[in-house]
Every structure is written in structure tokens, then in C-alpha cells.
Amino acid sequence: MAVVPSLGTGLLVGASQALAVGGPLTLLISYLILSIVAYCLTSTMAQVAAHVPAQYGTLVTHSYRYGSRHFGFAVGYLRWYTLAMMVPFEITTAMVNLGLWEPSAKVAIRITLIILVLHAFNFLPERAFKRTEVMFTGLKLILTIGLLAFSIVMFVSGPPGARGFDYWRNTGPMNVQLADGHLGRAFGVAQCLLYSAISFILLPELFVHQAEQKEDPQSAGILSMSRRNGLQVFALYILSALAMGVVCPSDDPLLTNFEAGVGYSPYIVAMRLRGVRILPSIVTTGILISSVASGRTFLYLSSRTLHALAENGHAPSIFYDRNRFGSPYAAILASGLFSFIAYISAAQSSTEVYNWLMPVITTCGYLSWMSASFIYLTIRRATKGKELQPSRKSDIQPLAAYLGITCSMVLPLANGLTAADPSRFNIRNLIPAYIGIPVFLVLYYGHRSINTSEGTSQVDESSIEERETEQTGSSRIAIHWINRVRSNMGDATDNEV
């Protein structure tokens, strides 16, 4: 099973606010919907990766090939700063998990320690880093499965009023938001989806990235492994959503830090309500370790993305340099600068900082979803869907790509619901929800206005081909299809974007 970096933080902590907003049944419905959408996006990205392998990742490389150099530039940096923004998000989640909700010097000290640990891990030799990745993956699995076992015990033998589906009956399965009746429940589902999306937003790309690293890039295993890992992780997420809704009441104020934002994990709240000793401290420590592990992985992925951009000539060459341990030190330091955003928690409530970072990241994720779907549809249109090997085809295409584009357009628009409560409405709350869109447009049109020479594009794209393809039969086929796609698309790719 693939255990992605977001497991343990986005799932165990991020679900608290979603549960409080929507209720237990709404949380389960939200996870089911997002699992379907994320699976469709996984299939979309994996089919492109299996058909035309790319050394530096499907999303970035194929954005240059099948969109335009301007589109590829914007998508490449979108991926970089989205992954880099996940580092302060994980650090802030660690502060929330520890109950450090109020700004203080204690918060700043702990943030500093975590940042130092994250950077220390990333300056290790890559082989040593990957060995520690296996260890942290095992800890995450043990923690998640252990909490599921705790939920089963409480479901069967919990105290009266707190066993089985008692909380569903006592507090109601679906909460209402902004209105009464069915409309209020629909708003509750929408807000629960928005709060839950952080747990799913990077899953499709991470599944495909892991498959590209482990499978032969010229085999059909990328598609099958990505989808298999997706189904396994989504099943784990759905079971966890059901478990959290069973053991924890959705109206407990600790879930939202007394309506200030995100609060304790539903599992921690459940243990406190039942008077369980020692175990809450163990789980809190486990979630803290998961946050640190996730932060170090996101710093690794973001720095390697910047390193790849530099290698292909789309970032300053200094980010391509490595130290004697093989670590791209300049790329790590540049990506690590985002971690200092976490220090806002030393001046403002960490729960509020969490709620500020979350929509910034999810909006960027939606843009990545849209870009991946666009890339697939562009390839399909150019090749007319022909000459794909049956083992590299997905039965749910092209509907999956169209669903990805639809959700990528609807969910950002719905982000405004998180600030729609009239009693707490502030126009500043809308900025995090939509700031990712103008940033992406500035990257695209800024690059387009500066790089007007067609010759630059051809040099960049040819360098990608030279570095990413081997002189084998399969790679020559890949180059053949790249050239055929370009010829079919003509010179109007920039206008299509």
C-alpha cells in the first residue's frame, strides 16, 4: 500500500472541522465523493504517464509538451510552491495537534525545532532519506490501524450513549449550515467537502509519482499500480471517516477550538470524553511525528521539483547544484523558505493560520487537477484516442477527465462558502480562497510576455527530450507520438490554453 505524506495529518486532524461542520454522515459522504473524484484524477494522470513516460513527472513535463512553454512554466511553479506550502501547513497542524492554539514564545520555539529537523533530514544522502521514509511510513500505518481498532472497540463495548451509532442519533447524522431543511444540509455537505479536500488534494499526483519511481517507465505497471494504491488508500480514508463519526460527537467544541477554527483530532476528543488515560498522549505524539514526517517529505518533493525545473532550464542553474551527499542544497533552502510562514502562529492563533493556509493549498490543487485533465484531453484529441495499448487504457476515460475539470471549476467557486457565515463574514477571508488563481495567471501571462521568441521554446523542449528519453524501441515510439501530437496541434497550442 502507498502511504502518502498527507496520511496522519490531513486525515486525523483536518477531519475535525469537517466533522463539526457537516456531521458524521456528511463526513462519510464527503469522503466518498472526494475518493471518486481523486480516483478519476489518478486514472487520468496515470494513463498519460503510462502512455508517454516522463522522467521528471507527468504533470510538469507534459504541460510543456502538450500545452505550451508558458503553460508548462506556470504548472511547474504551481506544483513547486504548492508542495512547498504544505511544509508550513504541516508545521501549523503539529501546533494545533499539540493544543498550542494561542500565540506565544513557546510556539515559536517548537516551530524552530521542527524546521531544523525537516532541513536536517533533507540534507541527508538520498539513500538514507528513503530509508527513514520506510520507517515513518510504518509508523503512520500502525497509528492509523491502531485508531481504527480503538474505534471498533468503542463501537462494540463503549459506555451507554456512546456506543454503536448513538452519536448519529443524539447529534444527528447531517448538520445544517446557512439555511434550514434540505438546503441547509446541502450547504453542510458543500462546506464539509471543502474542509475535507485538503486530505485528498495531492493524492492523485503522489500516487502516480510513486508508481513512476517504482515501475519500469516503459511498462503498463504505472497505470495499474497507481489505481491499485489509490483504491487501497481511499478505502482506508473512508473507513477512518466512518470511525471518527462513530466515536466522536460532531457538536463537541474541542473539534473547532470553540468555533475558532480547527481543533483536536476526533480520536483525541473521543478518548478525552471516555476518560482514557495515557493513550491520548501516545496518539498526540504519533500525530506529531506524522506531521514532521509529512513536512520533510513535502520539502523533499518541492526541492526536487525546483531542481528538475533548473535542470531543464526553467529555473536558475544554482538550483541544479548538489552537495557531496547528492542533495540539491540550494533548491532545499529555497523551498524551505516557505516553512517560515509557520511563524505566523507565534503571533496569531494556529487554528486561524491553519484555516488560512488550507484554502490556499486546495485552490492550487484544483488548478493542478484541471491542468492534468487538460493534458490528457489534449493528447486524446491529437491522437484521436487511437493506438493506445489496451493495458494502458482506462475504462473510465474520458469521463474521468471531464469530471476532473468540472470539479476543478466548481470547488474553487464553492470555496467562498467557508467565509459565507454572515456572523463572521470578512472580505479578507476570501483572499486565501482565491489568491492561487491570479498567481497562476501571473505566472502564465508573465512568462508569455517575457518569452516571445519561438526559438527559446524549441531549445527548452528539445532539452527535455534529450534528457528524458533513452535510445530504446519504446522511447523512440514515445518521441514519435510527441512529434505527431505537436504536428496535429499545430502552432495554436498557446491559444488553446
Image (spheres, rainbow, N blue to C red):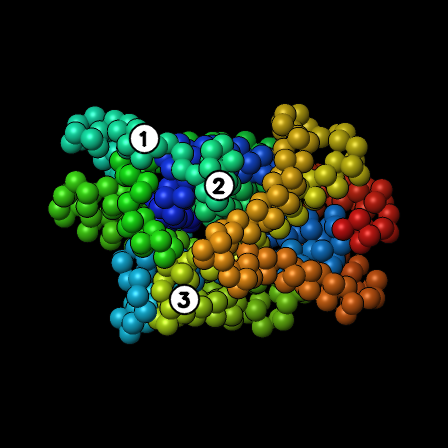
Q: Residue 488's quadrant in the figure?
A: top right
Counting from the top left corner in percent of width and height, residue 414 is at 57, 46
Task: Kindly identify the residue that appears in the image at 29 percent across and 72 percent down.
Answer: 104
Please identify, in this view, whether the residue under mark 1 or under mark 2 is nearer the observer. Answer: 2
Name the kind of residue labelled 1 in the image.
Answer: Trp
Counting from the top left corner in percent of width and height, residue 249 is at 29, 39
Q: Nearer the viewer, residue 107 or 168?
A: 168
Q: Which residue is mark 3?
A: 342
Task: Kindly identify the residue that appears in the image at 32 percent across and 57 percent down.
Answer: 96
Q: Quick one: SS at disc 3?
A: helix
Mark 1 vs 2: CB contact within 8 A: no
The mark nearer the N terminus, 1 or 3, is: 1
Give the quadrant of the N terminus: top left
Q: Quick one: SS at disc 2?
A: loop
On the question of residue 8 being in view, the answer is no
The mark nearer the N terminus, 3 or 2, is: 2
Task: Kindly identify the residue that appears in the image at 36 percent across and 35 percent down.
Answer: 24
Q: Which residue is mark 1?
A: 168
Q: Quick one: SS at disc 1?
A: helix
Rendered view: 119 above or below 127: below
What whole-number distance in Å separates the C-alpha atoms at marks 3 and 2? Answer: 35 Å
Query: Crowdedness of circle 1 by 10 Å Cα count: few (<14), some, many (20+)?
Result: many
